Image (cartoon, grey):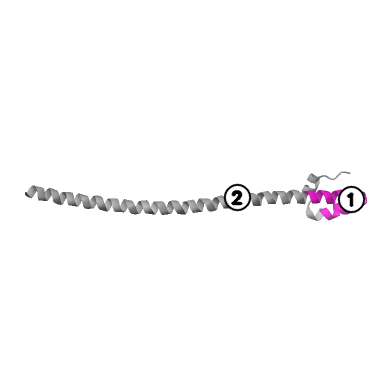
Amino acid sequence: MKVTLDAFRKVNLICVDVIMMQYLNNGVLIECTFILQEEKRLLQEDIKQDIAKLLEKRRDMLYLKEKQNKLGEMLSEITDGLKLVRRCKRSIGEKWAEAKDVAEQL
């Protein structure tokens, strides 16, 4: 009787011991152990891949956070410059109005 990996995935953990005891007499215990080791290896590979993906996403997130901070600083500088331009425009408008009034009086 051949025990497959899919068969073990479907079996409840409580039943694994019972199945292994039943197959002990038929020499299948070694095969069961191999299947469990293979399952463990596959799970470890999946976990390593997931961790690698998470580390890559973390690196990307840190890069984007740094870029966001730089863009925030640039936006702050632009906003400050815009406020200065508006004050200058208002001041020039006031000076223009004063010059116009003086010119009319002459």
Tell me the residue that label 2 is attached to: 56
Q: Is residue 47 left or right of residue 63?
A: right
Verify whether residue 20 appears in magenta: yes
Bin the neighbour count of mark 2 within 10 Å (Cα to Cα): few under 14, some 14-19, many 20 and up.
few
* SS type, badge 1: helix
Front of the two marks 2 and 1: 2
Residue type beneath disc 2:
Glu
Residue 3 drawn at (x, y percent): 85, 45
* Disc 2 and disc 1 in contact, CB within 8 angstroms: no
Along the polypeptide, which appears first: circle 2 or circle 1? 1
* SS type, badge 2: helix
Residue 35 drawn at (x, y percent): 82, 48
How many numbered callouts?
2
Residue at image position (80%, 56%) is 14
Tell me the residue that label 1 is attached to: 23
Residue 97 drawn at (x, y percent): 16, 49
Bin the neighbour count of mark 1 within 10 Å (Cα to Cα): few under 14, some 14-19, many 20 and up.
some
Q: The magenta stretch spans which residues?
A: 16-38
Residue 15 drawn at (x, y percent): 82, 53
Q: Tell which residue pokes out farthest to the right in this image.
A: 25
Q: Tell which residue pokes out farthest to the left in this image.
A: 106
Residue at image position (76%, 50%) is 41
Residue type beneath disc 1:
Tyr
By secondary structure, the bulk of the magenta-drawn segment is best described as: helix
Depth check, front residue: 12 or 52: 52
Residue at image position (48%, 51%) is 67
Depth check, front residue: 39 or 19: 39
Verify whether residue 70 appears in magenta: no
**Cα gap from disc 2 to disc 1, whole angstroms:** 44 Å
- Quadrant in which the N terminus is drawn: top right
Q: Can you tell which mark lies on residue 83?
A: none
